[in-house]
Image (cartoon, rainbow, N blue to C red):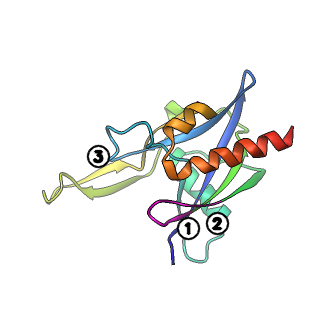
Amino acid sequence: MAKRSAGLLIHSRNKGDLRVLLVHPGGPFWAKKDDGAWSIPKGLVDENEDELSAARRETEEELGIKIDGPFTRLGDYRQPGGKIVMAWSVEARIDIDVAAIRSNTFTMEWPPRSGSMKEFPEVDRAGWFTLPEAEVKILKGQRPMLSDFARQKDAER
């Protein structure tokens, strides 16, 4: 069975422009990657956990803030590695200062085969992007989320 992740596509309007919040993964593998490396805040769904609850939990862990709804289901997205990401869109009801995010951390051996364990933030930064900017920044497997989100917003007009 494919691994399941759940996440939130957080959006807001700034002077009429629709923007989405993306996060950049922490750790040495992603340190020098930018375009095509960003993601929605997301993470693995625990066994017997509700997917939306997992999306909200993971977002809080990665940003250090709690996001409230209403949440609109975007869909399920199969990633190149086979993982399924379930996503919801939600409008930011608070001003999220991306410079002030506080992410949880993970530990890994670094450098490889050194025997030395180092701690890294799961997310090292976040940013607000217009949809065309986000299309360049986001991981290839998550781009369909942006298209579905744009269609969803067009349908609401």
Q: CA distance from mark 1 to mark 3?
A: 24 Å
Is residue 44 highlighted in magenta?
no
3 or 2: tag closer to the N-terminus: 3
Left or right: residue 105 versus residue 151 is: left
Which residues, given as a range, are shown in magenta? 76-84
Mark closest to the chain's N terminus, 1 or 3: 3
Q: Secondary structure at mark 2?
A: helix
Residue under pointer 3: 28
Q: Quadrant of residue 78?
A: bottom right
Position of the C terminus by quadrant: top right
User: Left of 122 or right of it: where is 155?
Assistant: right
Quadrant location of residue 156? top right
Above or below, 116 against 17 in this view is: below
Q: Amino acid at mark 3?
A: Pro
| Along the viewing direction, whichever of 141 and 116 lies nearer the viewer | 141
Q: Are marks 2 and 1 in contact (CB under 8 Å)?
A: yes
Q: Is residue 94 above or below residue 82?
A: above
Q: Any mark on residue 51, and which?
A: 2
According to the picture, the residue beneath numbered tag 1 turns out to be 45
